Image (spheres, grey):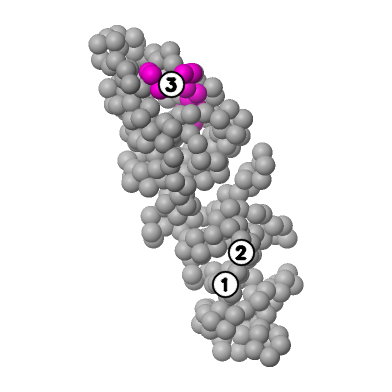
Amino acid sequence: MLIKFYLSCHKNLGNGYTKMHQPDVQWKKTVEKALRAMIVDDEELARSFLKEMLGLHPDIEVVAECPNGFEAVKAIGETRPDLLFLDVQMPKLDGFEVLELIDPGPVVIFVTAYDQYAMRAFDAHAVDYLLKPFSRERFEKALERARLRLGEQIPRVDLATAARAPEERPQRIVVKDGPRVHVIPIEKLDYVEAQDDYVALHSGGKSYLKQQPIASLESLLDPARFVRIHRSVIVNLERVARIEPYGKESRLAILADGARLPVSRSGYAKLLEAMGDSQGNRNTTR
């Protein structure tokens, strides 16, 4: 169905554009140079279709096309687009994960065949949500909204939280490290430490720094698997080998790899409840 739609639009793309839509006069006066647009979609036909529609606007330059999220994160950092046409479901990284990894800046229009992501897209401050297949009129309306949004100061949101339904738990955590992107499966996350506005994610003997408050990350993790044992530490229960006293009223959680983590009084109570053993030994039958 989508292929037929793209092909039919491709044949008629140049017909009647001037009559259908005239660029906003006020907007013309405020823009002095070409707008830089970027297209991210795993379907080549969809990318070509968007590029041809954007080609009808001489003031817009398509600076990059990407078939997956990894390439998109890199290209966004290199090209600094003004407009970002972004698919949601893609291999490697989805659209929401891409936004989580880039600096605020581009105005985002989601382009997808799935309507269940619409509310999440607007929570992430997307300017519009194009549901495939869409008409030329619908595309032009989205583009006009994007033009009006350009130059506005959009508050940075916690995309890791905003992009998911309240009951939905992430299956992985994505971290940008310079030009590289690391994907950490949740089951491989050992523990988390707060470091100011960042969290240090420890996995398999390595540490990854991510800009996210620890309270935000805690709200995403399954409380049956992860417990906040200290105001600055979240631990994977499967990694806890034992709990030892430390000083007068302090305790340490000793992990299977030998890591020693501080445990607060309230954290100790939560840890014991989750582990199901009043002595602080891991209940492996649970």
Kind of residue at disc 1: Arg
Report helix, strand or loop for mark 3.
loop
Q: Confirm whether residue 155 shows in the render.
A: yes
- Residue shown at 35%/30% (left/top)? 148
* Residue that mark 1 sits on: 231
* Residue that mark 3 sits on: 31
How dense is the environment of label 2, judged by Cα within 10 Å: few (below 14), some, or many (20 and up)? many
Q: Confirm whether residue 94 shows in the render.
A: no
Q: Is residue 93 left or right of residue 86?
A: right
Q: How many marks?
A: 3
Q: Position of residue 6 (x, y in %)?
A: 36, 20
* Residue that mark 2 sits on: 194
- As for residue 114 lying within the magenta part, the answer is no
Query: Given the current orientation, which residue lies at the most extreme left position?
Result: 19
Q: Position of residue 92 (x, y in %)?
A: 55, 41
Q: Earlier in the sequence, mark 2 or mark 3?
A: 3
How dense is the environment of label 1, judged by Cα within 10 Å: few (below 14), some, or many (20 and up)? some
